[in-house]
Every structure is written in structure tokens, then in C-alpha cells.
Image: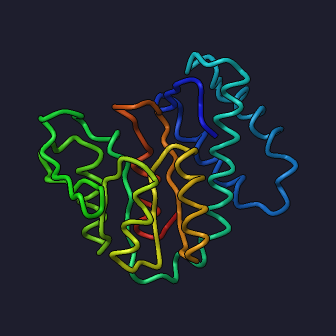
Amino acid sequence: MGYTFTFDLSKLTQTLFKEIAEFSEKEKITARIGDMAVNLVKKFDVDKITGLSVCDSVTVIEDLINANIKNSLHKKHFLKTNKRVLFLPHCCRKYMDSRCKAEFDPETASYLCKHCSNDCQVHKATKLANRKNYDVYVLPGSSCVKKIFQKNSYDGVIGVACTEEIGLATKILEQLNIAAQSIPLIKNGCSETRFNFEFLKRTIVGTK
């Protein structure tokens, strides 16, 4: 869903995200998602740590659970894929101005990381993915996905994005019968957004 608020879950313990992943791999859990989200918000003090209302905290956790459920459903298919690509959001760049040396490719409407900052999440993710033979695109939005697939053929996708963009991209990929794994942002907004790098790493190396 689209959020009317910003959030930052980066200060929460990693145990929260592990419990979300474990819960998402269980069978017949759809009816319990709301209850589980409420329990996690209370257990990990999500509202107190983030400053969000309880209602907004539950919404964010529910969306993370749903994204993880999708991952669980598509995981076996994804692990069988051969040619994979990583999509990263451009808002995760360390700099959103001329200090970022990423090159924009008008043919794919995406950026190519030039590794100008060692502590940039895009740099670290691109470096890791390239070592595992992934192509990497840094995207302004999910609308670029179709354009990329018109030029290249991939059967496996990892996408880092907010849950709204994940939902839009998932529909496109399902229509193309392409297996995907998503990494939801844990800090949203138009710049300085963040994702769980360890979660991405486990997904890339196939141990998630």
C-alpha cells in the first residue's frame, strides 16, 4: 500500500525480521496476519521505537509479512532460475545530487552504479550481486521494469523497494511468469531510504 507517513525500522532488533520471515513460511496463516502483526508490534515496541501510531505500526508490519509470504511462495521457483537481475531503488543512494557519480541510461531509464562511495548501500549491493553474476539496475520506479525486460531476458528477479512499488512490480513479473524475491525497505521516504542488507545478502546467495 502507499503510506501517508514515513517510518524507520532500522533501529529495531533483527529478531523482529527473523520472526516475520519464520512466520511467513508457515502454511495457512492468512487469517492470522493481523493478529501476528499486532503481537509483533507489542513484543518489539515498534510504535515506541519508531514514533508511529500503533495503527500505522501494524500496517507496516502487515505489509512486511505479506511481502515475505510472497517470497516464500515463489522461493522454490526462484532458486531454479539461471539468469537473474537485481533492481535497486535510486532513493537508497548515499547522495541524491551530483556527488553521486552513477550514470543514467535513457534506454532502460535506470542508473548504473559507479562505486563512488564505499558506504553507499547501492554500491555494496551492486558489488555483491555482480560477484554472483546478477545484472543490476538502479531504478527511479517500478514503471522501468517493463522497459528493461523488453531489452533483456531474465528468469529470476530480486527487487528492493517500498511495499507499494513491490506490489506494482510483482503484478508485472507474474504476468511475465518470472520468479521474484522482494526486499522491502525498512526506512521509507524520497531519499536516504534503507533496506536490510543481511536479508538481501542471504537472498542473493540463496540461503534465505
Q: Residue at x 59, y 25 (%)?
A: 4
Q: How many marks?
A: 0
Give the percent coordinates (x, y) of residue 95.
22, 34
State the residue in front, 86 or 119. Answer: 86
Q: Kindly identify the residue that appears in the image at 29 percent across and 75 percent down.
A: 133
In the image, is residue 68 above or below residue 205?
Answer: above
Looking at the image, residue 69 sits to the left or right of residue 136; the answer is right
Q: Is residue 116 above or below residue 206?
A: above
Residue drawn at (40%, 38%) of the image: 194
Q: Tell me if residue 208 comes above or below residue 47 in the rendering.
A: below
Q: Nearer the viewer, residue 115 or 42?
A: 115
| Image location of residue 109, percent across then percent down | 30, 56
Query: Which x, y percent locates residue 67?
Result: 63, 52
In the picture, the quarter occupied by the N terminus is top right
Quarter assignment of residue 99: top left
Question: Residue 58's quadrant in the figure?
Answer: top right
Residue 143: give x, y in percent of width and height. Answer: 45, 55
